[in-house]
Image (cartoon, rainbow, N blue to C red):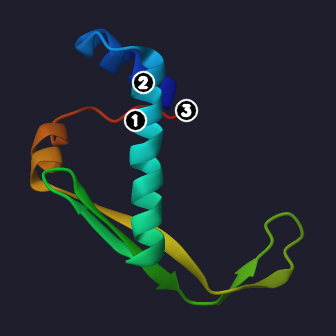
Amino acid sequence: MTKNDLVICIAKATKCRQADIKRIMQMTLDGIIDVLATDGRIELRNFGVFTVKRRRARKARNPRTGEKVMVPAKNVVTFRQGRLMRDRICNVEPCDGP
């Protein structure tokens, strides 16, 4: 499911315009990004917790050439699911991929 598919589902369920739903959804996602950029953590009750963690620099290997390369340190976003999400998806079959 894409963001646009989700917008369509919400618009049908609420009988609101898709443009309004899309704007609200984008504002929500932008807000999450802003909080992560400033505070490094956002908790959405019953959904989960997003946190920013620092990944160390490391040595890696280019799979095409076999050459060793240095991967610099970087910040990554991690997600830990909330209890409600965990309980609801516990018995769901995983999708096969993209």
What element does badge 2 sit on?
helix
Whole-number angstrom distance, CA of label 2 to CA of label 3: 28 Å
The mark found on residue 20 in the picture is 2
Label 2 close to label 3 by CB (< 8 Å): no
Report, in whole angstroms, how far the alpha carbon at label 2 lies from the one at label 1. Answer: 6 Å
Residue name at image x 44 percent, y 80 percent: 53
User: Type of residue at label 1?
Assistant: Ile
Q: Does 4 appear above or below 13?
A: below
**Residue wearing tag 3:** 98
Classify mark 1: helix, strand or loop. Answer: helix
Between 39 and 51, the residue placed more toward the observer is 39
- What amino acid is labelled 3 in the image? Pro
Q: Residue at x 44, y 76 (%)?
A: 38
Query: What residue would you read off at disc 1?
Result: 24
- Determine which quarter of the picture holds residue 32: bottom left
- Give the CA separation, mark 1 to mark 3: 26 Å
Q: Are marks 2 and 1 in contact (CB under 8 Å)?
A: yes
Q: Position of residue 17 (x, y in %)?
A: 40, 14
